[in-house]
Structures are given as structure tokens and as C-alpha cells.
Image (tube, rainbow, N blue to C red):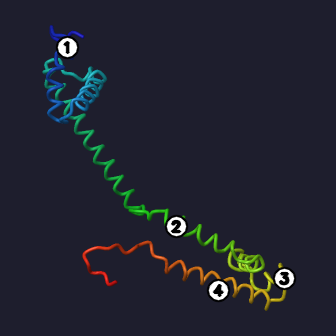
Amino acid sequence: MERKGRTFDVLGQLGSLRRYARSLVRNADDAEDLVHDALVKAYERKASFRRDGNLRTWLLSILHNVHIDRLRQKKSLNRRHEEAAGEIEPALPAPQDHTVRLSQVREAFFSLPEEQREALHLVAIEDLSYQEAAAALGIPVGTLMSRIARARASLRNFEEASSKVSHLRLIEGGGNEKR
């Protein structure tokens, strides 16, 4: 487009735009992206360029404003991410210990005699009352209570035995051990 004998020579300003963008973002790839975005805005707003204006200054101003917009967007995005991060639990415990422990408890539960396992399942897992569980199994309430008591005792014994097992072992060291 012809303006006062001059053309709208954006390509002649690329060197200046690239140098300025590089000094703003300190990265060649980001600088190229910044120049590209600034040129897109310049072509979109080509009609707003004043005939007596300095094209180089106008383009550098657009580049600067695009850079400021990007900084604001990045700051806003970081703030939203920080707020979202504050809403979630900062660290989750490793699931391996839970998985291993659940597997051990499941194994202990399934190793109970069938009548104890049935009784405990109905009361502890299905949340039936003693009367409802006894009726479901067709046994007296006293028998149900006895089976549940024996099942719980077995699981307590399992718990006590597994808590005594240590994952640590004593190794010989600086002569402080008693033999």
C-alpha cells in the first residue's frame, strides 16, 4: 500500500523487530513467535497506521504491546494454576503401602473359616444388624456373635503378628552391637 510515496514495507523492518524481540524474551524461538504475532496484529490494523507516522516505531510499539499482553497472560495463567494447586492436596501418599496392606488384610480375611467370614462380612461390610445377619444365615444371634468374635480375634492376632515384623534389619557397623 502506498503512503506518501512510501510503501508499507514491513519486511524491511524485520531485522529491527527480531533484535528487539530477542532482547525482550531472550530466546530465539520465542522471539520469532513474538515477531510473527506482532506482524499479524500490524496487518490486521494496517488501516490505523497514520500516513505521517514512522512505520518502524509503530511496528516496535505493536511488538512491545504484544509482549506485554503475553506477560500479563502468563502471569494470569500462573496465578490461576497456583490457586488451583492450593485447592488440591499438595502431596498424595504413595499407594504402594496401602495396596500391600490391603492385600494382606484381604488375605487374612479370606483365610478365616467360612462361617466366621460370612458372619463378619454381613455385619462389618454389609452393615446388617446382628438380628438381620443371624436371620440371613439361619442361625441364632448368640452363634453369630460367637463367630464374629472369633473372626475379629483372628484378625487382631494377624494384626499383632504383622506389626511385629520389621522391614529393617540390623547390620554390623561400628562395633556398637552387643553379641
What x and y, as percent, mark residue 60? 16, 28
Among the two numbered marks 1 and 2 on one chain, the one whose residue lies closer to the N terminus? 1
Q: Observer-nearest residue: 58 or 13?
A: 13
Decide: few, some or many residues near mark 4? Use Cα within 10 Å; few <14, some 14-19, many ≥20: few
Seen at 32% across and 74% down, the residue is 172
Among the two numbered marks 1 and 4 on one chain, the one whose residue lies closer to the N terminus? 1
Residues at badges 1 and 4 in contact (C-beta under 8 Å)? no
Q: Amino acid at mark 1?
A: Asp
State how far apart marks 2 and 3 are (Cα): 35 Å
Q: Observer-nearest residue: 69 or 36?
A: 36
Which dot marks residue 98?
2
Give SS at disc 4: helix
What is the residue that sits farthest to the right in this orientation?
Answer: 138
Give SS at disc 2: helix
Seen at 59% across and 67% down, the residue is 103
Residue underneath mark 3 = 135
Residue underneath mark 1 = 9
Among the two numbered marks 3 and 1 on one chain, the one whose residue lies closer to the N terminus? 1
Q: Observer-nearest residue: 164 or 45?
A: 164
* Of the two numbered discs 2 and 3 in the rendering, the one whose residue sits closer to the viewer: 2
Quadrant in which the N terminus appears: top left
Residue underneath mark 4 = 153
State how far apart marks 2 and 4 are (Cα): 22 Å
Residue 63 against residue 82 in the figure, above or below: above
State how far apart marks 4 and 3 are (Cα): 23 Å
What x and y, as percent, mark residue 158? 59, 80
State how far apart marks 1 and 2 are (Cα): 67 Å
Residue 149 against residue 67 in the figure, above or below: below
Seen at 64% across and 74% down, the residue is 108
Decide: few, some or many residues near mark 1? Use Cα within 10 Å; few <14, some 14-19, many ≥20: few
What x and y, as percent, mark residue 53? 14, 21
